[in-house]
Amino acid sequence: MKIKLICVCSLVMIKLSALTGQNALQIPPALYGPVYDLNVQNGVVEFIPGITTPTYGINGNILGPTLFADKGDVVTLNVTNSLTGTGNSTTMHWHGFHLPASADGGPHQVIDQGDTWSPSFTVMNDASTLWYHPHGDGKTDLQVARGLAGFFIIKDEVENALTLPRTYGVDDIPLAIQTKAFDVLHQIAIATEMDTLPMVNATVDAVADLPAQVVRLRLLNGSSMRTFHIGFDNNQLFYVIAGDGGLLSEPVALNRLILAPGERYEILVDLSGMESEVLTMMSFGSTLPSGMYGAANPSGMGMGTITGYDANPLNGSDFSLLKIQVIDQTADPVTEIPSSLTPPITTPAYTATRVFNLEPESMGMDNMVMGPFVINGASFNMDIVNEIVPINTIEKWRINNNTGIAHPFHIHEGQFIIDNINGAEPDPVDRGMQDVVYIPAGQYAEVIKTFSDFADDQVPYMYHCHMLHHEDDGMMGSFTVVAQDEVINDHIVPPLIYPNPVASNSTFSIVTEGEFERMEIYNSMGEIVYLDDFHQQAVNAYTIDGLPSGVFIIKLINGKNDNATTFIVQ
Ligand code: C2O
Ligand code: CU
Ligand code: CU
């Protein structure tokens, strides 16, 4: 009964603000380098007319300026933490950048209240829509939800040579799409499924005047949890020209686009000849596949629920994000969608494989969907480096989503190539450089990543789920990139077992890298049920007789190191 009431309440609130009219879409101010002063401060915003909500912002009440840089620039970012309140240290992460770990702004680069952190680095990324946001240990969700996030737009000669809209705020528009939850005191709330208020650039019921020509929208999902299914109410086609890390080889025409937390896409919309028409950018939650947060059913396996999920009227429904009023053309309009953009990416050969298993921390049907989740059996630990990567190598990272919900998996240090999703080619929109890969429930992704330029055996980079509640709950790990002579030869990557689950008394394969001497298999009681001593790089077609059905842990060991993977015998 009570849940029903809350639900009706939030519906009424959305309706009320819609009735009181639309609000002009805020465009974050542009800020140019090479030195950027960013003040992280408290703010106040009236999301709901007449009601003020405390927020955080960068150089303002909420969100931050859009930073512009050219590829090759040496930039310095002076980030000052002026937040009030107790224990409000922060961090600032340059999401998507290829830069030294010490400048990355991960959980280890804490900015205490009153302090300024000033990383400096060369912009090496191609033209792209990157972003920045805090990344404190267990603090990301709250600080991002309260308003800390901004765009970082990179330009380069390749992009400049194309006929594309690029007048910021006129035909080139950043759109930070978010939903937020509020508690009874109108404070922004996290770790609740009641993120009932959609907003774009922190504008509720936003309306933008866009010219009757080709316009470029830079989409960012800055939400804590929600996946959007972007499209227009008139089902108009749009053209995806860039993913997370920059331009695709050619525009991809679509009328729906899945946008998971942390992801960016640039789209072109041709508004030519539509003067004085009105169209609405929507999220079509009703057609979002099951197993994505935001769909009618967040479970990809048809089993398990998230407590409180069904009470949110946005889940599984279509809602508007941005109303577009088409106005007159500008003096120098772009009127055509380019036919090609950049040469297609060729996937380089990799020399090592690492395996990451996304799993619920504890068993249980609902935990398969709700979490908390862990990676390779472990929750994030500030004091542990989970993986050591030798510099100047190309690796394949296989991420097994052994959970009931899709996760947007993000890797720091720069961009990667999605080789496949469950063995199949990624969608055309994901065939450029990416820093987030969205992995459906029960499936896997394989990405190819080059690790280059920056060795540091002390400061780690992160990999994690970009659903911020999952991340803060520990669904994150760390890696260092180290000089070749520092690579400990006996580092063992987690073994890859397939098939997994395996039928009892049948043959299965174990693939790993690094030398190991011993294999141990434990049952769920922690008892050794099998062991073997051998000296090999990899084992294939191994048969183990007599394992009863259940969950087992296989551990590969050498003198100094071990690594383990869970597998299931049916
Ligand atoms: Cu956008 Cu590690 O984060
Ligand atoms: Cu990042
Ligand atoms: Cu997740």
Image (cartoon, helix red, strand yellow):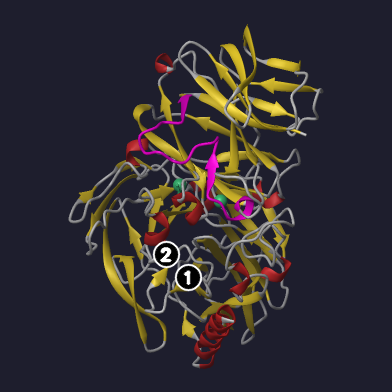
Q: Residue at x 48, y 43 (%)?
A: 476
The image quarter containing residue 539 is top right
Compared to 296, does 570 lie above or below? above
Place of residue 223 in the rendered image (x, y in percent of width and height, measured from the top left): 50, 63
The image quarter containing residue 124 is top left
**Neighbour tally class for label 2: few under 14, some 14-19, many 20 plus, Cα within 10 Å:** many
Residue hosting label 2: 145
Query: Could you say which disc has been placed on residue 391 in the image?
Result: none
Quadrant in the picture for the N terminus? bottom right
Q: Residue at x 35, y 50 (%)?
A: 136
Looking at the image, which is closer to me, 196 or 449? 196
Quadrant in the picture for the C terminus? top right
- Apparent side of residue 93 relative to residue 494 in the rendered image (left or right): left
- Label 1 element class: strand
Q: Are marks 1 and 2 in contact (CB under 8 Å)?
A: yes
Residue hosting label 1: 180
Residue 552 sits inside the magenta stretch: no
The mark tally for this picture is 2
Q: Residue at x 56, y 65 (%)?
A: 216
Q: What is the span of residues highlighted in magenta in the rendered image?
A: 367-389
Q: Is residue 340 visible?
A: no
- Label 2 element class: helix
Compared to 344, does 201 lie above or below? below
Kindly identify the amino acid type of the residue bearing the numbered disc 2: Ala
Looking at the image, which is closer to me, 566 or 93? 566
**Neighbour tally class for label 1: few under 14, some 14-19, many 20 plus, Cα within 10 Å:** many
Residue 388 sits inside the magenta stretch: yes
Kindly identify the amino acid type of the residue bearing the numbered disc 1: Lys
Place of residue 60 in the rendered image (x, y in percent of width and height, measured from the top left): 30, 69
